[in-house]
Amino acid sequence: MSAASACVGGSALVLAAFVLDMVFGSRITAWGIRPDITLAALAPLAMAVGAGRAAPFGLLAGVVQGAFLSPALGSMAVSRTISAWAVGLLEARFYHEHVVVTAAAGFLAAVLADASFYAFAPQERPGLYVARALGRAVYTMLLAMPFAVVVRRLFPRRP
Amino acid sequence: MLEDESRSIWRRIVPVVICVVLGTGLGIWHKAAVARGANDPVTNALRTVLSPVVTTSNAVAGWFGRTSGVLFRSRALNRENARLRRQVAQLTEEVQGLREAGIRAERLESALGFIRSGPSVKLPAQVIAVGPSQSFETLVIGRGTRDGVRRGSVVVAPAGLVGHVYDVTPTTATVMLASDPRGSVGAMVQRAESRVVGICRGLGGRTLRLGYLHRESDVRVGDVLITSGLGGSGGIFKKGLVIGNVTSVTEDPATSARSAIARLAVEPDRLEEVAVLR
């Protein structure tokens, strides 16, 4: 896949996941925990493209989410960038087409995004924040699996 | 070999550094624009392009949800319909009584020479999206500066206060919910024997704390809290909007001050339409 088509495909996936997040995110909230569908798509994407190319996709996801969640555009953008980049670093170390690895990447992406978000925008009740972040990470982990199938088709492994 | 490795490290590091710098710059630009009551062009463009897509997708998903709901829940809907009819009859009776009381209060106020504020104009607005973060309680509505919405405009729903407009683009506005931890609302207990006044601070997760009350303050579980019109985030909330219900009352042994935890009356996740007060 050429760099240009990878860029278009990845960006389209991030934007589609964001729209799904906006439409279904609040509808599938369970026990007060809302999954981050954008991150669920970003994690397998980052693992497929590697750290260098994952960072801009993370920035795109963060800016789009931040534009709709006004008070923290900068924190959202930076936290998603770092999260995507860190997950992208695992590209060469793991067989990223395995469903368990994808799920773990989703969990890691959500934890990293929330941890780095906290570093830039500290919250008033850290205990509650951590509890919710862990719940969200588990939920995001589950949702990362179907996105892994889409990513596998978009970015087939080179022989 | 060594050169290849160092080039590969740079290829990994440089993009993230550039993206972090860009993200930080955008954040600073955005904050500065919002402080001026406007918005940055990136946010404007993204919201202008994505809002119609989100709105259309929401409408389609809502239609599917309703249609499948009718197919699978017809018996439950019939029961709910009967219950709602009974409730409407009860409420109609209650409204008649309240209307009568309102007329009487109005007559007494004019006899006593009270200055009355005019009624607010309500601008209906569609909820486009509920904020995707767990840290901020926001929602995006499909009205902006073109419709006369300004930063600080109060947003309400039939159940009560929703929040205030945090930022605005020409076609959309972000509403910060009253339960957002960064916000506060001047509140009052609605019960005639109490009328305790305080400041409600958002705690997140649809809850608020009415804090620093005198230890003898008459606040009970189940009390309805309304806006007092005496301040809060910018002092923008007019008196009498329902905030929520008190769910627990606690006393701090160190200071003897009481505080009450209340649940927001509106359910943000289920809001489809709101009204902006102008």
Image: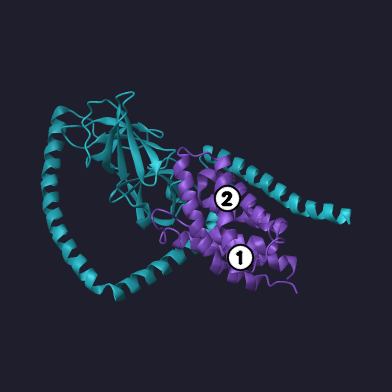
Q: Mark 1 is on which residue type?
A: Ala
Q: Quick one: A12 or B102, which is closer to the camera? A: A12
Q: CA distance from mark 1 to mark 2?
A: 21 Å
Quadrant (top left, top right, bottom left, bottom right) of the N terminus of chain B:
bottom right
Q: Quick one: B127 or A46, which is closer to the camera? A: A46
Q: Quick one: B131 or B255, which is closer to the camera? A: B255
The cyan one among the chains is B
Tell me whether marks 1 and 2 sit on the same chain: yes
**Against B233, is A17 above or below?**
below
Q: Mark 2 is on which residue type?
A: Ala
Q: Colour of chain A?
A: purple
**Against A17, is B150 above or below?**
above
Residue, x 22% and y 40% (percent of image)? Answer: B223
Rendered image coloring scheme = by chain
Label placed on residue B267: none
Residue, x 45% and y 62% (percent of image)? Answer: A23
**Image quadrant assignment for residue A88:** bottom right
Q: Quick one: A29 or A12, which is closer to the camera? A: A29
Label placed on residue A113: 2
State the image coordinates of residue B252 (x, y, percent, origin top left): 32, 28
| Residue at image mark 1 | A12
Badge 2 sits on which subunit? A
State the image coordinates of residue A16 (x, y, percent, origin top left): 55, 65
Count of marks, rendered view? 2
Give the crowd class for mark 1: few <14, some 14-19, many >=20 residues within 10 Å.
few
State the image coordinates of residue B103 (x, y, percent, origin top left): 13, 41
State the image coordinates of residue B20 (x, y, percent, origin top left): 67, 46
